[in-house]
Image (cartoon, grey):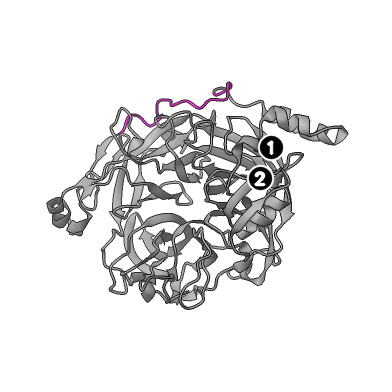
Amino acid sequence: MNHDSSDQSVTRRSLLKGLAGASALPFIASFAALQAREAGAADGSTMLVPSPYGKIAPVRDLTTGLPLLQLPPGFSYKSFGWTGDIMSDGYPCPGGHDGMGVVVSRRVGRSTELVLVRNHELGAGASAALLSAPAVYDRGSPPGSESQFRGGNSNLIFRDGNWVSVSPSLGGTATNCAGGVTPWGTWLSCEEVASNLVSSTGNRHGYVFEVHADPFQTSAVPIKGMGRFAHEAAAVDPATGIVYESEDSGGRSGFYRYIPFVTPGYPGSLAQGGTLQMARVKGIVNANLARVSVNDIYELEWVTIANPDQDRSDVVGPSGVAISNASGPFVQGWLQGGLRMNRGEGMWYDQGKIYVMDTSGGDVARGAIWELDLARQTLRCIYSSPSPTIGNMGDNLTVSPRHGILICEDGGAAGVDEFGMGNRLMGVTTAGDTYIFGKNNVNLTESELLAAGKLGTLAGDRRSSEFAGACFDPTGRYLFANIQTPGITFAITGPWAKGPL
C-alpha cells in the first residue's frame, strides 16, 4: 500500500538543500547553466501555441480514400498493415499496433528501402497470426486460460514512398507495448507485463526481445538480464552501448539502465549479459518524480539490481514509504533508495540526450517529459501538461532528424479541442510548449470499410484510440505512426521545413 502523505516528493529547492557542502558545487553550477532555458514556460508552465505547420483539417488517405487523419495543409499519407490485412505468410494481420521503429535503411538497386518493426500489444486470445512467425517464444497459455499468447512483432517494408509488404517476425509474447531501435539495426521489443506471469509451459513473461530486420534471424530468446517488469520503452546510448529502460507500473515505476558486457554492440550482443541498474536521485532517498514542473532538475546516480528476474512483491524503502505489488527490480532498487516515476513510457535518443515520457506525470497527472543528459547524468523536466487541451497523457514519443519532439497521445475521449474530439500527435517547441500536428479522425461505417477492402468489424468511432509508434525515416521525409485500434499504420509526408519536425 502506498503512503504518499509521507512521500518525499522532490522539488528543485529540496534537492539543493539535500546537496550540502563542496561536493554540491559542480552540480549547482550545471544547474544554473541549465536554467538559461529558451524563452517561454519560464514560470514552469507548458502552453498550447499555434502550429508552425498551420491548422489541421481532415485529409483523405491516398490508399483507401478514407479521411482517417486530420493534418496541416500540404501533408498527405498512405495507410497500410490494417488489422485483418493478409500478411506475406497468408495469415491476417493482428491488431494492437503499438511501438515501432525504422531499423534499416538500405539501397535495393536504385531504390531506397526501409524496414520497420512494429509491436502488437496483445495478450492471450484466439488469433494465432503471430504464432506463424519464424521465432516464437511461448506456445503455452496464461493461468486459467486455454488461449495462447498472441503478442509479438511484424516487419514492414517501405520502398520509394510506397508500402510493399508486412511479415510476422516474433510470436508467443505478451503485451508488446513499446521498445526501441538499436544502433546496430535491430528492434528491442518490450513486454509490458505487470505480474508474476508464468504460462502453462513454465515460461515467464515481462522481458525484452531483440527483433531483426530479417525475421528469420530473430531468436525469440528473452534478454533476462534487462529485467522482468512492465517494460515500456528502451533507448540506446550509441557512445557507450548502455540501454535505458522505462517502466509503466502506476506509481511504482523505476527508471533503469542495462550496461552490457559486450561493447560495441551488435545483433545478439545484449543477450550475452550485462548489469541492470536503477536510478536514484543524488542526496534524496526514494525520490518521487511524479509531480513535477518545467525546469525541475535532478542529478542521478545508479544502484545495482542483483536479481533482474526477481518476482513482484511489496516493499518498504529506507524513507519509510511502502509500495505494494512492485516488480522485483523495483523492489531491489527501492530498498537502495531508488527513485520512482508515475508511469514511464516512451523514450528516444537524440544528440547525447534521452527523452523520457511520464504519461501521467506532471502537476495535474496529464504528462511530463524528462530530458536525460547522458554526460551530466541529470534529469530535467522540459514539458509538464497543465490540462488535457495542452497535452493529454502522451505515451510514445520520437525525435525527428531535425531534432523536433513529437508526442503520441493516449488520453481517450477527453482530448477535445477546436478540431473536435480525439487523440493527437503533438509537437513540442524548444520552449517546451505544445502544438497540434495531427489528430485521429477514424470514425467509419461498415459499408465504408468494406468498400475500401477492410474488415467491416472494424467499424465505429475510434477517435479516442491512441496514437503509437511514431518514428521518422533517416532523411526526415516520412513520419510513420500507428493508431492502435482498429490497428492502422501510416506513412505521412509533407512540408516539414515549415516547422521543427
Q: Are marks 2 and 1 in contact (CB under 8 Å)?
A: yes
- Residues 233 and 343: in front is 343
Give the magenta-colored segment's residue range: 41-56
Question: What's the residue at 59%, 33% (across, down)?
Answer: 292
Labels 2, 1: front one:
2
Per the rendering, the mark at residue 339 is: 2
Q: Amino acid at mark 1?
A: Tyr
Q: What type of secondary structure mainly makes up the magenta span? A: loop
Quarter-of-image position of residue 241: bottom right
Q: Which residue is mark 1?
A: 298
| Residue 77 visible to an observer of this rendering | yes
Q: Quick check: 465 left or right of 443?
A: right
Give the amino acid at mark 2: Leu
Element marked by disc 1: strand
**Label 2 CA crowd tier, 10 Å (few <14, some 14–19, many 20+):** many
Q: Nearer the viewer, residue 495 or 303?
A: 303
Give the residue displayed 53% in from the left and 70% down from the top.
Answer: 204
